[in-house]
Protein backbone atom coordinates (compact mmCIF):
# COMPACT_ATOMS: atom_id res chain seq x y z
CA UNK A 1 0.00 0.00 0.00
CA UNK A 2 1.30 3.47 -0.87
CA UNK A 3 1.87 5.84 2.04
CA UNK A 4 0.26 9.26 1.96
CA UNK A 5 2.30 11.78 -0.05
CA UNK A 6 3.97 14.72 1.71
CA UNK A 7 2.05 17.93 2.25
CA UNK A 8 3.03 20.62 -0.31
CA UNK A 9 5.36 23.21 1.16
CA UNK A 10 5.28 27.00 0.69
CA UNK A 11 7.46 28.44 -2.05
CA UNK A 12 8.31 31.30 0.32
CA UNK A 13 7.46 32.35 3.87
CA UNK A 14 7.38 36.05 4.64
CA UNK A 15 9.56 37.40 7.47
CA UNK A 16 6.35 39.20 8.51
CA UNK A 17 4.29 36.01 8.40
CA UNK A 18 0.59 36.34 9.14
CA UNK A 19 -0.57 34.17 12.05
CA UNK A 20 -0.61 30.56 10.77
CA UNK A 21 -4.04 29.95 12.31
CA UNK A 22 -5.62 32.65 10.12
CA UNK A 23 -8.59 31.17 8.25
CA UNK A 24 -11.06 32.30 5.57
CA UNK A 25 -14.16 33.85 7.12
CA UNK A 26 -17.01 34.74 4.79
CA UNK A 27 -17.77 36.01 1.32
CA UNK A 28 -20.15 38.95 1.08
CA UNK A 29 -22.04 39.17 -2.21
CA UNK A 30 -24.17 41.94 -3.66
CA UNK A 31 -27.27 40.34 -5.17
CA UNK A 32 -30.30 41.39 -7.21
CA UNK A 33 -32.91 39.13 -5.59
CA UNK A 34 -32.29 38.25 -1.95
CA UNK A 35 -35.35 36.00 -1.63
CA UNK A 36 -34.38 33.88 -4.62
CA UNK A 37 -30.77 33.64 -3.51
CA UNK A 38 -31.76 32.57 0.00
CA UNK A 39 -33.96 29.83 -1.43
CA UNK A 40 -31.01 28.49 -3.41
CA UNK A 41 -28.46 28.59 -0.59
CA UNK A 42 -30.83 26.89 1.84
CA UNK A 43 -32.75 24.45 -0.35
CA UNK A 44 -30.09 23.48 -2.89
CA UNK A 45 -26.85 23.81 -0.89
CA UNK A 46 -28.33 23.08 2.52
CA UNK A 47 -26.91 26.10 4.35
CA UNK A 48 -28.60 27.39 7.50
CA UNK A 49 -30.05 30.89 7.69
CA UNK A 50 -28.37 32.62 10.63
CA UNK A 51 -30.02 36.04 10.41
CA UNK A 52 -31.96 38.27 8.03
CA UNK A 53 -33.02 41.89 7.87
CA UNK A 54 -34.71 43.90 5.16
CA UNK A 55 -31.90 43.78 2.59
CA UNK A 56 -29.25 41.38 3.93
CA UNK A 57 -28.78 37.90 5.36
CA UNK A 58 -26.09 35.63 6.71
CA UNK A 59 -25.80 31.88 6.20
CA UNK A 60 -23.50 29.07 7.21
CA UNK A 61 -23.47 25.81 9.12
CA UNK A 62 -24.91 27.08 12.40
CA UNK A 63 -21.88 28.95 13.72
CA UNK A 64 -20.18 31.95 12.13
CA UNK A 65 -21.46 33.16 8.78
CA UNK A 66 -19.53 32.09 5.72
CA UNK A 67 -21.92 33.53 3.12
CA UNK A 68 -23.47 36.99 3.41
CA UNK A 69 -25.86 38.48 0.87
CA UNK A 70 -26.99 42.08 0.42
CA UNK A 71 -29.60 43.08 -2.14
CA UNK A 72 -28.83 46.22 -4.14
CA UNK A 73 -31.09 48.17 -6.47
CA UNK A 74 -30.51 48.14 -10.23
CA UNK A 75 -27.41 45.98 -9.95
CA UNK A 76 -25.69 44.76 -13.10
CA UNK A 77 -23.37 41.90 -13.97
CA UNK A 78 -20.14 43.07 -15.60
CA UNK A 79 -17.57 41.08 -17.58
CA UNK A 80 -13.85 41.71 -17.93
CA UNK A 81 -13.48 43.13 -14.42
CA UNK A 82 -11.78 42.06 -11.20
CA UNK A 83 -13.69 40.51 -8.33
CA UNK A 84 -14.44 36.97 -7.24
CA UNK A 85 -13.86 34.01 -9.54
CA UNK A 86 -15.28 31.55 -7.04
CA UNK A 87 -15.54 30.85 -3.35
CA UNK A 88 -15.02 27.34 -2.04
CA UNK A 89 -17.00 25.68 0.75
CA UNK A 90 -15.07 22.93 2.54
CA UNK A 91 -16.83 19.74 3.63
CA UNK A 92 -15.31 17.57 6.38
CA UNK A 93 -15.16 14.30 4.43
CA UNK A 94 -16.19 12.50 1.25
CA UNK A 95 -19.47 11.35 2.77
CA UNK A 96 -20.67 14.91 3.37
CA UNK A 97 -19.47 16.01 -0.05
CA UNK A 98 -21.35 13.05 -1.53
CA UNK A 99 -24.51 14.16 0.29
CA UNK A 100 -24.43 17.67 -1.16
CA UNK A 101 -23.59 16.33 -4.63
CA UNK A 102 -26.52 13.93 -4.37
CA UNK A 103 -28.71 16.89 -3.37
CA UNK A 104 -27.58 18.77 -6.50
CA UNK A 105 -28.45 15.77 -8.65
CA UNK A 106 -31.83 15.38 -6.93
CA UNK A 107 -32.70 19.03 -7.53
CA UNK A 108 -31.31 18.82 -11.10
CA UNK A 109 -28.92 21.69 -10.40
CA UNK A 110 -26.15 21.70 -13.00
CA UNK A 111 -22.71 21.03 -11.56
CA UNK A 112 -19.28 19.91 -12.74
CA UNK A 113 -17.67 17.19 -10.57
CA UNK A 114 -13.88 17.42 -10.79
CA UNK A 115 -10.96 15.50 -9.27
CA UNK A 116 -8.08 17.82 -8.32
CA UNK A 117 -6.27 14.77 -6.86
CA UNK A 118 -5.54 16.46 -3.51
CA UNK A 119 -9.18 17.52 -3.30
CA UNK A 120 -12.47 16.18 -4.61
CA UNK A 121 -14.84 18.87 -5.80
CA UNK A 122 -17.75 20.02 -7.84
CA UNK A 123 -18.41 23.48 -9.32
CA UNK A 124 -21.72 25.21 -9.86
CA UNK A 125 -23.24 28.68 -10.25
CA UNK A 126 -25.85 30.21 -7.99
CA UNK A 127 -28.95 31.74 -9.66
CA UNK A 128 -27.12 35.03 -10.31
CA UNK A 129 -23.96 33.49 -11.77
CA UNK A 130 -21.67 33.49 -8.74
CA UNK A 131 -19.41 30.45 -9.10
CA UNK A 132 -19.09 28.11 -6.12
CA UNK A 133 -16.75 25.23 -5.43
CA UNK A 134 -17.81 22.49 -3.00
CA UNK A 135 -14.90 20.28 -1.93
CA UNK A 136 -13.30 17.96 0.58
CA UNK A 137 -9.64 17.23 1.17
CA UNK A 138 -8.11 14.03 -0.21
CA UNK A 139 -4.33 14.39 0.40
CA UNK A 140 -3.98 10.61 0.58
CA UNK A 141 -4.59 10.57 -3.18
CA UNK A 142 -1.78 12.96 -4.13
CA UNK A 143 -0.44 16.51 -3.97
CA UNK A 144 -0.21 19.76 -5.89
CA UNK A 145 3.27 20.54 -7.21
CA UNK A 146 4.76 23.81 -8.43
CA UNK A 147 7.69 23.50 -10.86
CA UNK A 148 10.71 25.79 -10.75
CA UNK A 149 9.25 27.71 -13.71
CA UNK A 150 6.02 28.28 -11.80
CA UNK A 151 3.85 25.78 -13.69
CA UNK A 152 1.36 23.71 -11.69
CA UNK A 153 0.59 20.02 -11.84
CA UNK A 154 -0.69 17.28 -9.56
CA UNK A 155 0.98 13.99 -8.67
CA UNK A 156 -1.00 10.94 -7.62
CA UNK A 157 0.19 8.94 -4.61
CA UNK A 158 1.35 6.19 -7.00
CA UNK A 159 3.51 8.68 -8.93
CA UNK A 160 1.23 9.32 -11.91
CA UNK A 161 1.17 12.93 -13.08
CA UNK A 162 -2.01 14.87 -13.73
CA UNK A 163 -3.16 18.34 -14.72
CA UNK A 164 -5.30 18.21 -11.57
CA UNK A 165 -8.52 18.65 -13.49
CA UNK A 166 -9.68 15.08 -14.04
CA UNK A 167 -13.32 13.93 -14.13
CA UNK A 168 -14.46 12.92 -10.67
CA UNK A 169 -15.52 9.31 -10.16
CA UNK A 170 -19.03 10.24 -9.01
CA UNK A 171 -20.12 6.64 -8.44
CA UNK A 172 -17.19 6.09 -6.07
CA UNK A 173 -18.02 9.32 -4.24
CA UNK A 174 -21.71 8.50 -3.87
CA UNK A 175 -20.80 5.04 -2.56
CA UNK A 176 -19.88 6.79 0.71
CA UNK A 177 -23.58 7.46 1.34
CA UNK A 178 -25.69 5.11 3.42
CA UNK A 179 -29.43 4.53 3.52
CA UNK A 180 -29.54 6.75 6.63
CA UNK A 181 -28.13 9.84 4.84
CA UNK A 182 -31.00 12.26 4.29
CA UNK A 183 -30.59 14.80 1.51
CA UNK A 184 -33.03 17.30 3.02
CA UNK A 185 -31.00 17.93 6.18
CA UNK A 186 -28.79 21.05 6.47
CA UNK A 187 -25.04 20.74 6.15
CA UNK A 188 -23.21 19.64 9.33
CA UNK A 189 -21.60 22.14 11.69
CA UNK A 190 -18.09 21.17 10.51
CA UNK A 191 -18.66 22.75 7.07
CA UNK A 192 -16.81 26.06 6.64
CA UNK A 193 -15.31 28.39 4.08
CA UNK A 194 -12.26 26.73 2.55
CA UNK A 195 -10.77 29.33 0.21
CA UNK A 196 -11.42 32.18 -2.19
CA UNK A 197 -10.26 32.58 -5.77
CA UNK A 198 -10.06 36.11 -7.15
CA UNK A 199 -9.81 37.87 -10.49
CA UNK A 200 -6.94 40.37 -10.28
CA UNK A 201 -5.23 42.75 -12.67
CA UNK A 202 -1.55 41.84 -12.11
CA UNK A 203 0.06 38.71 -10.65
CA UNK A 204 3.22 40.37 -9.33
CA UNK A 205 1.37 43.22 -7.64
CA UNK A 206 -1.05 40.76 -6.06
CA UNK A 207 1.75 38.51 -4.78
CA UNK A 208 3.53 41.50 -3.28
CA UNK A 209 0.35 42.64 -1.51
CA UNK A 210 -0.66 39.31 0.00
CA UNK A 211 2.76 37.73 0.55
CA UNK A 212 5.30 40.50 1.06
CA UNK A 213 3.06 43.05 2.76
CA UNK A 214 0.36 41.05 4.58
CA UNK A 215 2.51 37.99 5.20
CA UNK A 216 0.61 35.10 3.63
CA UNK A 217 2.71 32.12 2.56
CA UNK A 218 3.47 32.09 -1.16
CA UNK A 219 2.25 28.72 -2.44
CA UNK A 220 3.31 29.36 -6.04
CA UNK A 221 2.77 31.70 -8.96
CA UNK A 222 2.25 30.10 -12.38
CA UNK A 223 4.17 32.27 -14.82
CA UNK A 224 4.16 29.89 -17.78
CA UNK A 225 0.90 30.76 -19.42
CA UNK A 226 -1.52 29.71 -16.67
CA UNK A 227 -1.57 33.19 -15.09
CA UNK A 228 -2.48 32.13 -11.57
CA UNK A 229 -1.02 32.31 -8.08
CA UNK A 230 -1.86 30.99 -4.62
CA UNK A 231 -1.24 32.11 -1.04
CA UNK A 232 -2.24 30.73 2.34
CA UNK A 233 -1.76 30.95 6.08
CA UNK A 234 0.10 28.17 7.83
CA UNK A 235 1.13 26.30 4.67
CA UNK A 236 -2.35 25.19 3.57
CA UNK A 237 -2.39 24.45 -0.17
CA UNK A 238 -4.28 27.72 -0.76
CA UNK A 239 -6.59 30.00 1.15
CA UNK A 240 -6.62 32.48 -1.71
CA UNK A 241 -6.05 31.85 -5.39
CA UNK A 242 -5.72 34.72 -7.84
CA UNK A 243 -5.63 34.93 -11.61
CA UNK A 244 -5.58 37.38 -14.52
CA UNK A 245 -8.07 35.41 -16.61
CA UNK A 246 -10.17 38.55 -17.12
CA UNK A 247 -7.13 40.13 -18.73
CA UNK A 248 -3.93 41.82 -17.58
CA UNK A 249 -4.87 45.21 -16.22
CA UNK A 250 -8.55 44.34 -15.84
CA UNK A 251 -10.40 47.24 -14.16
CA UNK A 252 -12.42 46.96 -10.94
CA UNK A 253 -16.20 46.68 -11.34
CA UNK A 254 -18.37 49.82 -11.06
CA UNK A 255 -20.23 50.50 -7.79
CA UNK A 256 -23.50 49.09 -9.20
CA UNK A 257 -21.93 45.72 -9.99
CA UNK A 258 -23.47 42.53 -8.66
CA UNK A 259 -21.01 40.07 -7.15
CA UNK A 260 -18.25 40.67 -4.66
CA UNK A 261 -18.64 43.15 -1.81
CA UNK A 262 -15.75 41.72 0.21
CA UNK A 263 -14.08 38.57 1.47
CA UNK A 264 -12.89 38.13 5.03
CA UNK A 265 -10.19 36.36 7.00
CA UNK A 266 -10.38 35.54 10.69
CA UNK A 267 -7.35 35.70 12.98
CA UNK A 268 -7.27 33.63 16.19
CA UNK A 269 -7.01 36.50 18.71
CA UNK A 270 -6.65 40.24 19.19
CA UNK A 271 -2.88 40.04 19.52
CA UNK A 272 -2.62 38.50 16.04
CA UNK A 273 -4.87 41.20 14.58
CA UNK A 274 -2.87 43.96 16.31
CA UNK A 275 0.33 42.49 14.86
CA UNK A 276 -1.20 42.52 11.39
CA UNK A 277 -2.39 46.11 11.87
CA UNK A 278 1.12 47.15 12.88
CA UNK A 279 2.43 45.60 9.67
CA UNK A 280 -0.26 47.36 7.60
CA UNK A 281 0.73 50.68 9.13
CA UNK A 282 4.44 49.91 8.68
CA UNK A 283 4.03 49.49 4.91
CA UNK A 284 1.69 52.51 4.80
CA UNK A 285 -1.19 50.50 3.40
CA UNK A 286 -4.51 52.41 3.43
CA UNK A 287 -7.14 50.80 5.65
CA UNK A 288 -10.45 51.46 7.35
CA UNK A 289 -11.19 50.45 10.93
CA UNK A 290 -14.75 49.07 11.02
CA UNK A 291 -16.93 47.58 13.75
CA UNK A 292 -15.89 44.13 12.52
CA UNK A 293 -12.21 44.66 11.92
CA UNK A 294 -9.68 46.06 9.47
CA UNK A 295 -10.74 46.59 5.86
CA UNK A 296 -8.15 46.88 3.09
CA UNK A 297 -8.25 46.70 -0.70
CA UNK A 298 -5.80 44.74 -2.82
CA UNK A 299 -4.19 46.21 -5.98
CA UNK A 300 -7.20 45.01 -8.04
CA UNK A 301 -9.55 46.86 -5.64
CA UNK A 302 -10.93 43.67 -4.11
CA UNK A 303 -11.97 44.41 -0.51
CA UNK A 304 -10.59 42.19 2.27
CA UNK A 305 -11.69 42.32 5.91
CA UNK A 306 -9.54 41.00 8.75
CA UNK A 307 -11.27 40.28 12.06
CA UNK A 308 -10.90 38.25 15.24
CA UNK A 309 -12.60 34.93 15.88
CA UNK A 310 -15.67 35.25 18.12
Image (tube, rainbow, N blue to C red):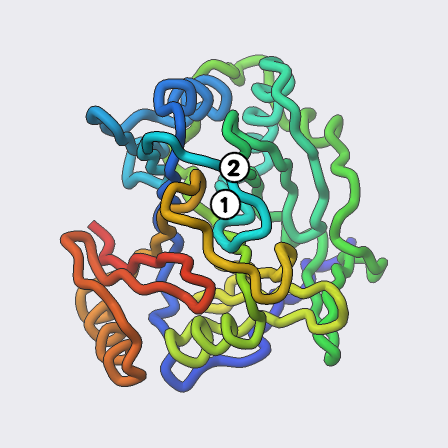
Residue 87's disc is 1
Q: Which corner quadrant of the image does residue 213 belong to? A: bottom left
Q: Is residue 183 above or below residue 11?
A: above
Whichever of labels 1 and 2 marks the residue nearer the N terminus, that label is 1
Q: Is residue 95 above or below residue 271?
A: above
Mark 1 crowdedness (10 Å alpha carbons): few <14, some 14-19, many ≥20: many
Of marks 1 and 2, the one in the foreground: 2
- Residue at 33% x, 30% y is 73
Kindly give the residue lying farthest to the left in the view shown.
291
Q: Secondary structure at mark 2?
A: loop
Q: Position of residue 141 (x, y in %)?
A: 71, 51
Query: Between residues 172 and 194, which one lies in front from this camera angle?
Result: 194
Query: Between residues 4 and 289, which one lies in front from this camera angle?
Result: 289
Q: Which corner quadrant of the image does residue 210 belong to? A: bottom left
Q: Position of residue 74 (x, y in %)?
A: 38, 31
* In the displayed structure image, the side of residue 2 where residue 293 appears, left or right: left
Query: Between residues 301 and 57, which one lies in front from this camera angle?
Result: 301
- Residue at 64% x, 60% y is 247
Q: Position of residue 166 (x, y in %)?
A: 78, 45
- Residue at 37% x, 47% y is 255
Q: Secondary structure at mark 1?
A: strand
* In the displayed structure image, the side of residue 64 where residue 245 appears, left or right: right
Residue 193's disc is none
Distance from Cα at disc 1 to Cα at disc 2: 9 Å
Q: Is residue 93 above or below residue 41?
A: below
What number of labels is visible?
2
Q: Position of residue 154 (x, y in %)?
A: 75, 59
* In the displayed structure image, the side of residue 148 where residue 176 appears, left or right: left
Query: Contact (CB < 8 A) between labels 1 and 2?
Result: yes
**Residue of label 2:** 130
Query: Between residues 212 and 176, which one lies in front from this camera angle?
Result: 212
Amino acid sequence: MNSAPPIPQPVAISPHRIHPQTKPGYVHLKVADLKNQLAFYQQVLGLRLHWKDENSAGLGAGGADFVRLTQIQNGKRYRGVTGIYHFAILFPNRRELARVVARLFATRWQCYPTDHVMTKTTYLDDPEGNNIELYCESPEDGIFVVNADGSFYARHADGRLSDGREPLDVDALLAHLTKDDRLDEPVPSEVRMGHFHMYVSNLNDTRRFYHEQLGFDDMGVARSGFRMGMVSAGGYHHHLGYNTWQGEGAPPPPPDALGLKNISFVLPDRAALDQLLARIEEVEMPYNQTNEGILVTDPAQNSVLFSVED
